[in-house]
């Protein structure tokens, strides 16, 4: 489970520090999302849970006449995205980044397209959040996002979790926020209050944890800061921490092939239309 306070604290800070590696980890998924977005009209676009901004920045380059807002709850990630925007060669400087809870965000103008790469599975009350996003959008606005499918289809998560001590049981919740909260399409439909005509396209891809000459070191650096091993390694006392680190290295080395460390991953590409009819 990863909630707002984690994203506003250590988890957001680590994602901000690791933005190059997290962009690389999604590099086989991102073209599928950008191709799907390219098929949608949109002049006022919101990237929800934009993180360090790769999707918003790509859209700003691809659509110089569009207005693009990246929205994220982590100030560290928003600052990183804004810094990237200031360094990027974006015609028209048509993108800006805002630190705000997307479930409460009031945009200056209603978006006609909302997008997200894995940024919409963390709301504590998804139906409330999605109803809000529909209410602030143009009538008939479109939403396109990616999210992970089930853990057993995502080796990067299950194989690393298998190295760790068993997690403590937490109180059950109807919509527990976290990377796998949107694994089941029926559940996603129930979460997406205010949206209709859902479509779910499965995308299988390689999660690239490391590339190049130092692929193993890159992957170890990523996993020690991001994902299931990161928080466990922070909390574990010695000598258990050293044992997990040794097992993590073995796992990463076993996935090192052809100059990269890659794990099987599986996502949904989801699209839907806003039910909002207020003009
Ligand atoms: C898995 S990361 C994905 C980040 C980015 N979209 C990417 O692909 O690199 C999830 C993002 O959702 C953001 N987030 C979580 N809850 C949020 C909320 N209520 N409002 C806005 N952003 C949120 C996090 O801060 C984080 O940046």
Image (cartoon, rainbow, N blue to C red):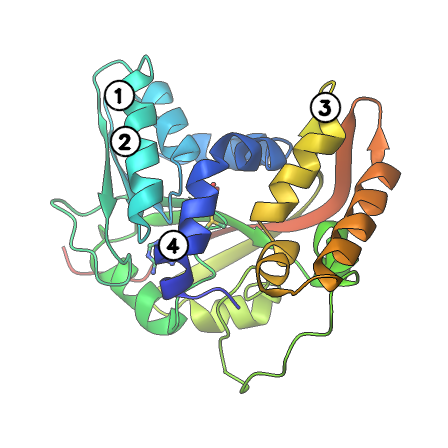
Q: Nearer the viewer, residue 225 or 42?
A: 225
Could you tell me if the residues under marks 1 and 2 are in contact, i.e. CB atoms within 8 Å?
Answer: yes
Q: Percent from the top left, x then y, of residue 32?
A: 58, 34
Q: Which residue is mark 2?
A: 82
The answer to which quarter of the image holds residue 105 is bottom left
The alpha-carbon separation of the residues under discs 3 and 2 comes to 29 Å
The alpha-carbon separation of the residues under discs 4 and 1 comes to 32 Å
The alpha-carbon separation of the residues under discs 4 and 3 comes to 44 Å
User: Is residue 134 visible to the viewer in this orientation of the structure?
Assistant: yes
Indicate whether 61 appears above or below 218.
above
Q: Nearer the viewer, residue 138 or 240?
A: 240
Callout 4 secondary element = strand
Callout 3 secondary element = loop
Q: Nearer the viewer, residue 145 or 210?
A: 210
Quick check: 256 left or right of 121?
Answer: right
Q: Which residue is mark 4?
A: 273
User: Is residue 208 visible to the viewer in this orientation of the structure?
Assistant: no
Q: Nearer the viewer, mark 3 or mark 2?
A: 3
Q: Nearer the viewer, mark 4 or mark 2?
A: 2
Marking on residue 86? 1
For the point 52% across and 64% down, the residue is 178
| Neighbours of disc 4 within 10 Å: few (<14), some (14-19), many (20+) | many
Q: Percent from the top left, x then y, of residue 230?
A: 60, 54
For the point 33% across and 33% down, the residue is 81
| Neighbours of disc 3 within 10 Å: few (<14), some (14-19), many (20+) | few
First reached walking from the N terminus: tag 4 or tag 3: 3
The alpha-carbon separation of the residues under discs 1 and 2 comes to 6 Å
Q: Which residue is mark 3?
A: 214
| Neighbours of disc 2 within 10 Å: few (<14), some (14-19), many (20+) | some
The alpha-carbon separation of the residues under discs 4 and 2 comes to 29 Å
First reached walking from the N terminus: tag 1 or tag 3: 1
């Amino acid at each position: 489970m990863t909630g707002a306070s984690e994203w506003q604290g250590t988890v957001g800070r680590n994602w901000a520090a690791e933005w190059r590696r997290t962009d690389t980890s999604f590099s086989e998924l991102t073209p599928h999302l950008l191709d799907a977005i390219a098929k949608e009209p949109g002049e006022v676009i919101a990237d929800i849970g934009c993180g360090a901004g790769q999707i918003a920045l790509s859209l700003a380059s691809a659509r110089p006449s569009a207005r693009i807002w990246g929205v994220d709850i982590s100030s560290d990630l928003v600052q990183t995205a804004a810094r990237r925007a200031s360094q990027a060669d974006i015609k028209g400087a048509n993108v800006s980044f805002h630190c705000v809870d997307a479930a409460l965000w009031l945009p200056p103008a209603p978006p006609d397209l909302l997008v997200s790469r894995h940024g919409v599975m963390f709301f504590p009350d998804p139906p409330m959040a999605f109803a809000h996003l529909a209410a602030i959008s143009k009538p008939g606005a479109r939403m396109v996002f990616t999210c992970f499918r089930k853990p057993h289809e995502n080796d990067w998560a299950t194989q690393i979790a298998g190295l760790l001590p068993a997690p403590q049981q937490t109180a059950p919740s109807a919509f527990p926020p976290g990377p796998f909260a949107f694994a089941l399409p029926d559940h996603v439909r129930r979460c997406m209050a205010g949206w209709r005509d859902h479509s779910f396209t499965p995308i299988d891809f390689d999660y690239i944890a490391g590339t190049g000459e130092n692929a193993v070191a890159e992957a170890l650096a990523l996993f020690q800061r991001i994902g299931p091993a990161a928080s466990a390694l922070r909390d574990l006392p010695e000598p258990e921490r050293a044992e997990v680190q040794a097992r993590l290295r073995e796992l990463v080395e076993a996935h090192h092939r052809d100059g990269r460390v890659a794990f099987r991953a599986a996502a949904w590409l989801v699209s839907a239309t806003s039910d909002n009819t207020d003009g």
